[in-house]
C-alpha cells in the first residue's frame, strides 16, 4: 500500500468512526441506551455493514466510553485554557469555574438540539453506565485528574454523604403500576415515601457494616443526592466544596479537634436537614 493509499484509508476509518459516534449519540439521546442496537446505529450512520459498531468499537460499553471520551477531550481543552488563566489565583470561585464552566461552554458550542446533554442524562441514570462515565472523566481529562488528586480523599466525602445523608425528607411518590418490593406488593395509585437514608444503610448495597462510618469504603452507590433522572443537578459542586473544605481545613489546622465530648455536641434531630446547632473545636 502506498503512503497516499494509507492516508486515504486512515481518513475513511476516522470518518466512519465519527459517523457511528454521532449516530449512536443521537439515537441514545432520543430512545434510550438500552433501546438501541448496533444494527440501528450502523444504518443511521449510513453503513451497509451491520457489524460496523462491533468492528470499530467493540461492545456497547466501549461505544459509550468512546462518546464520553470524545466530549471529555474537548471539554479538557477549555479547562486547560481556564486553568492557565487562573494559575496564580487564590479565589475558590475561579477553581469552581474551572470545574463547572468547561462543560457549559462546550454544551453551548454544540448548538441545539444538544444530543450530548440528553445522552449524558440517559447514561447517568443507569448505575452500570454511570460508572463508565465517572471512570472515563479523569482518563480523558488529565488536568481534571490533577485537580481532583489535590483535593481531600474523595472516598471520605462519599462515605460521609452516605453515612449522614444530610437531607432527611422522604421523597413522596405514587406507583404508576403494580410493583413488588422486597416481597411487598405496591398497587398502582398507592403512595410511597422513599427514605434515602434507609437506602444508604441497605446491607445488599453496602454489605460491610453499613451502620459504621468507614472512609475507605467505596460508597459511590449511595442515594443521598437522589437517583436517576431525579438526582440533584448540583451534586458535583457539593462534592467539590466538601473536598476543598476538608482538604484545606486539615492541611492548615492539622491539630483541629473537638473541644467537648461527642455526646455533648447538640445535633439537629427534629428537622429535615441533619447537622449540628454548634460545634466547639480547639487546636
Image (cartoon, grey):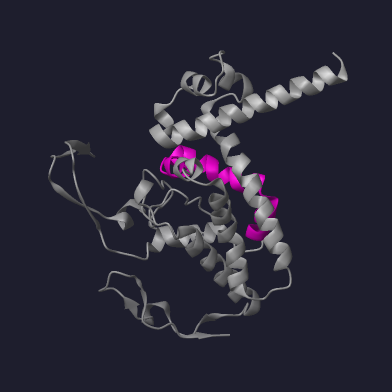
Using the rendered image of the protein, determine whether residue 212 is visible from the camera's viewpoint: no
Q: Main secondary structure of the magenta part?
A: helix
Residue beneath the point at 58% across and 72% down: 93
142 in magenta:
yes
> Viewed as shown, does residue 123 lie left or right of 109?
left
Q: Position of residue 11 (x, y in %)?
A: 73, 25
- Figure quadrant of residue 265: bottom left
- In the image, 266 versus 247, the foreground residue is 247
Viewport quadrant of the N terminus: top right
Residue at 63%, 23% in the rendered image: 56
Q: Give the image location of residue 223, x and y in percent.
A: 38, 53
Whether 217 is among the magenta residues is no
Q: Is residue 182 left or right of residue 187?
A: right
Q: Residue at x 39, y 45 (%)?
A: 205
Q: Is residue 202 above or below residue 93?
A: above
Residue 84 occupies quadrant: bottom right
In percent of width and height, residue 82 lies at 68, 62
Q: Residue at x 32, y 70 (%)?
A: 273
Residue 18 at what x, y percent from top left? 62, 30
- Residue 43 visible in the picture: yes
Image quadrant where one finds the C terminus: bottom right
Q: Which portion, as a residue range, is magenta?
A: 120-149
Amino acid at each position: 500500500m502506498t503512503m497516499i493509499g494509507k492516508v486515504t484509508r486512515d481518513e475513511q476509518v476516522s470518518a466512519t468512526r465519527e459517523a457511528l459516534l454521532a449516530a449512536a449519540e443521537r439515537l441514545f439521546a432520543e430512545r434510550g441506551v438500552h433501546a438501541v442496537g448496533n444494527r440501528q446505529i450502523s444504518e443511521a450512520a449510513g453503513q451497509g455493514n451491520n457489524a460496523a459498531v462491533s468492528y470499530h468499537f467493540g461492545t456497547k460499553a466501549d461505544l459509550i466510553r468512546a462518546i464520553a471520551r470524545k466530549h471529555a477531550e474537548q471539554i479538557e481543552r477549555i479547562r486547560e485554557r481556564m486553568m492557565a488563566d487562573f494559575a496564580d489565583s487564590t479565589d475558590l470561585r475561579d477553581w469552581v469555574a474551572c470545574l463547572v464552566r468547561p462543560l457549559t461552554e462546550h454544551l453551548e458550542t454544540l448548538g441545539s438540539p444538544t444530543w450530548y446533554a440528553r445522552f449524558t442524562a440517559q447514561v447517568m441514570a443507569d448505575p452500570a453506565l454511570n460508572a463508565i462515565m465517572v471512570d472515563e472523566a479523569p482518563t480523558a481529562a488529565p488536568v481534571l485528574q490533577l485537580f481532583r488528586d489535590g483535593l481531600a480523599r474523595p472516598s471520605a466525602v462519599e462515605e460521609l454523604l452516605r453515612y449522614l445523608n444530610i437531607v432527611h425528607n422522604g421523597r413522596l411518590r405514587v406507583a404508576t403500576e403494580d410493583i413488588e418490593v422486597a416481597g411487598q406488593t405496591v398497587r398502582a395509585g398507592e403512595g410511597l415515601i422513599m427514605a434515602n437514608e434507609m437506602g444508604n444503610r441497605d446491607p445488599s448495597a453496602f454489605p460491610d457494616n453499613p451502620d459504621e462510618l468507614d472512609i475507605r469504603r467505596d460508597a459511590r452507590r449511595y442515594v443521598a443526592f437522589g437517583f436517576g433522572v431525579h438526582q440533584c443537578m448540583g451534586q458535583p459542586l457539593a462534592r467539590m466544596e466538601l473536598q476543598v473544605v476538608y482538604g484545606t481545613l486539615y492541611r492548615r489546622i492539622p491539630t483541629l479537634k473537638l473541644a467537648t465530648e461527642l455526646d455533648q455536641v447538640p445535633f439537629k434531630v427534629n428537622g429535615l436537614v441533619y447537622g449540628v446547632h454548634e460545634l466547639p473545636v480547639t487546636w
